[in-house]
Amino acid sequence: MTTVTKQQRKARKPRVIEAEEHTVEIVSDPGEGAQKCGQIFGSVSAKMGNGAWTVELIPAEIQPPPRIPAGASGNRIRIGRGHISNWGDGTDLAVCFNEQVLLNRHRVDALADDAVVLLENMWKDHPDETIRKQWVAAMKEISSKNYRVVEIPMDEICRTVVDDPRKGKNMFALG
């Protein structure tokens, strides 16, 4: 494991990667605003002159229980320099509000083998042992791919601005 200090991080120059096209997914439990986040991202991308194509990811069940893979809800956005007419192949970047929605996208083979996954990490250390075990099992299952999982304390960061992160996490992800 490598430890990098804040000073070392600040000294680094950001690495810019230009791509002809890129596919992004924002995925959460229903009601957390991932669909709205994706709609805004797609709309802003198009207004900036990019080709854009979006599709909502809607669970089959109406009001599914939280934290189940089949309940994944969100939006898939494909943007590019030219005309975009379909949702493309594997997702390059996925923003997941929990590991169960990540499992859904993994199981339906929606993610590129080398996808970057920004994952809410509050579930890893959750007080409920069942949830912690679900986290471990999910991480084990997705380890068969070369995803680059970046754990982010979205809930913790959002609480510095709003009382209920479920009513602001989507805009945090958009930012």
Image: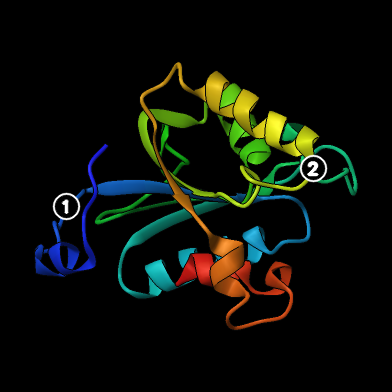
- In the figure, residue 169 lies in which quadrant? bottom right
Q: Quadrant of the N terminus?
A: top left
* Residue 61 badge: none
Residue 134 visible to the viewer: yes
Q: Amino acid at mark 2?
A: Asp
Instruction: Name the disc covering residue 128, or none.
Output: 2
Q: Residue at x 73, y 45 (%)?
A: 58
Q: Is residue 60 left or right of residue 49?
A: right
Residue of label 1: 17
Query: Residue 10 at x, y = what percent?
Result: 16, 70
Which of 88 and 65 lies nearest the eye of the viewer? Answer: 65
Which one is in front in this view, the residue at disc 2 or the one at disc 1? 2
| 88 to the left or right of 29 | left
| Residue at (64% x, 46% y) in the render | 125
Quadrant where the C terminus sits is bottom left
Residue 173, percent from left and from top: 51, 64
Relative to 89, is 81 above or below? below
Task: Let me know if residue 108 appears in the view.
Answer: no
Q: Residues within 10 Å of mark 1 (few under 14, many from 20)?
A: few
User: What kind of element bears circle 1?
Assistant: loop
Q: Quadrant of residue 50?
A: bottom left
Point 74% across, 74% down: residue: 164
Distance (Cα) linking label 2 and label 1: 40 Å
Density class for disc 2 (Cα within 10 Å; few <14, some 14-19, many ≥20) is few
Which residue is drawn at the image coordinates 28% and 48% (left, top)?
21
Q: Taking 44 as reference, is 17 left or right? A: left
**Amino acid residing under circle 1:** Ile
- Sequence-earlier tag: 2 or 1: 1
Image x and y of residue 29, in percent:
74, 50
Query: SS class of the residue under badge 2?
Result: loop
